[in-house]
Image (cartoon, rainbow, N blue to C red):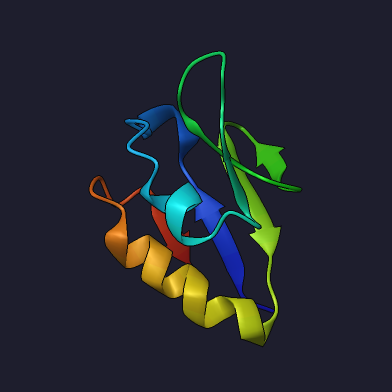
């Protein structure tokens, strides 16, 4: 099953992920970085499995990230 992988520590807080896919992302009020909702944290790398329907939109979000810290695998 495809996964979204987010390297949160490298996030610059631009908000493009939240703007394009608010059902999966939130912007933290504490540090201004993006948070991947319902994800599992494994040593600072956040992951969540996605369905085929969400994969296309998530792929667009990953391409729009200016620092390339969102991956779809």
Q: Which is nearer the eye, 20 or 70? A: 20
Q: Residue furthest top?
A: 30
Q: Is residue 8 left or right of residue 53?
A: left
Height in image: 25 above or below 72? above
Q: Specify whether residue 7 is in view.
A: yes
Q: Residue furthest left?
A: 66
Q: Which is nearer the eye, 5 or 26? A: 26
Q: Is residue 12 left or right of residue 24?
A: left
Q: Kindly identify the residue that appears in the image at 63 percent across and 55 percent down.
A: 24
**Residue 20 occupies quadrant:** bottom left
How many numbered discs? 0
Look at the image and tell me in which quarter the N terminus lies.
Answer: bottom right
x%, y% of residue 61? 41, 63
Q: Kindly identify the residue that appears in the image at 64 percent across and 85 percent down.
A: 53
Q: Specify whether residue 73 is in view.
A: no
Q: Is residue 16 left or right of residue 45?
A: left
x%, y% of residue 23? 65, 57
Q: Which is nearer the eye, 48 or 66? A: 66
x%, y% of residue 17? 44, 52
Q: Kindly identify the residue that appears in the image at 44 percent across and 28 percent down.
A: 9
Height in image: 61 above or below 37? below
x%, y% of residue 10? 36, 32
Q: Kindly identify the residue that appears in the image at 25 percent across and 45 percent down.
A: 67
**Residue 62 occupies quadrant:** bottom left
């Amino acid at each position: 099953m495809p996964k979204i992988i987010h390297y949160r520590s490298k996030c610059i807080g631009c908000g493009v992920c939240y703007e394009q896919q608010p059902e999966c992302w939130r912007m933290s009020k504490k540090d201004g970085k993006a948070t991947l909702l319902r994800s599992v944290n494994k040593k600072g790398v956040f992951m969540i499995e996605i369905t085929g329907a969400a994969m296309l939109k998530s792929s667009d979000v990953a391409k729009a990230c200016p620092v390339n810290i969102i991956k779809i695998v």
